[in-house]
Image: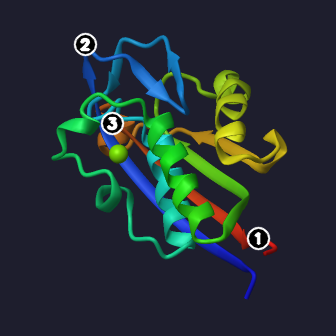
Amino acid sequence: MNMRIGFGFDTHRLVEGRPLVLGGITIPHPTGLLGHSDADALLHAICDALLGAANLRDIGFHFPDTDPRYKGIDSRKLLAGTVKLLHDKGYAVGNIDCTIVAEAPKLNPHVPAMQAVIAPLLQVDEDCVSIKATRNEGMDAIGNQEGMKVYAVALIYKRAQ
Ligand code: MG
């Protein structure tokens, strides 16, 4: 079979004193995502969707958060590394579709900038990078702005030899 799909999920806590890095861009907001890397939950979910599609384990397997090399790392490098793993296994990215669950800030105005960052990393057209955002309607920890969640699916295909 030449096409495969994968699913990814990530969540990070929101805290004061961290920049909000999401989709490879920094968004003005009083709180930011907490993590060993820049905590870019969108890029992490995309990495896991791609790795899952290629059956290449997960982001923590390749880039463990116990490794000091990845402390504070720009997650665009993790996504580039993930795409390299796919290419090495003979796959190219088809398209991705993501949903960010965040109570605030409003993310839709930032989607074009995220697509402009992510598409070249995946080596696809921006039209192949779908990013959606929704609120959690005030419910539970996400609705209370204590964190964000991201879901992503990816389609990959075997490259011609
Ligand atoms: Mg993460």
Q: Position of residue 69 (x, y in %)?
A: 24, 37
Q: Nearer the viewer, mark 3 or mark 1?
A: 1
Q: Position of residue 15 (x, y in %)?
A: 25, 23
Q: Is 19 rendered above or below residue 62?
A: above
Q: Which of the two discs, 3 and 2, labels the residue nearer the N terminus?
A: 2
The disc placed on residue 17 is 2
Q: Amino acid at mark 3?
A: Gly
The disc placed on residue 147 is 3
Residue at image location 37% in from the left, 56% down from the top: 59
Residue at image location 56% in from the left, 54% down from the top: 84
Asked whether mark 2 lies closer than 8 Å to ligand 1, one says no
For mark 1, give the secondary structure.
Answer: loop
Q: For the residues marked 3 and 1, what is the alpha-carbon distance in whole angstroms? A: 38 Å
Q: For the residues marked 1 and 2, what is the alpha-carbon distance in whole angstroms? A: 43 Å
- In the rendered image, which residue does mark 1 sit on? 159
Q: For the residues marked 3 and 2, what is the alpha-carbon distance in whole angstroms? A: 14 Å
Q: Amino acid at mark 1?
A: Arg
Q: Quarter for ligand 1? A: top left
Residue at image location 76% in from the left, 70% down from the top: 159
- Looking at this rendering, what residue extends furthest in the bottom direction? 1
Asked whether mark 1 lies closer than 8 Å to ligand 1, one says no
Q: Which of the two discs, 1 and 2, labels the residue nearer the N terminus?
A: 2
For mark 2, give the secondary structure.
Answer: loop
Q: Amino acid at mark 2?
A: Gly
Within 10 Å of disc 2 (Cα), the crowding (few <14, some 14-19, many 20+) is few
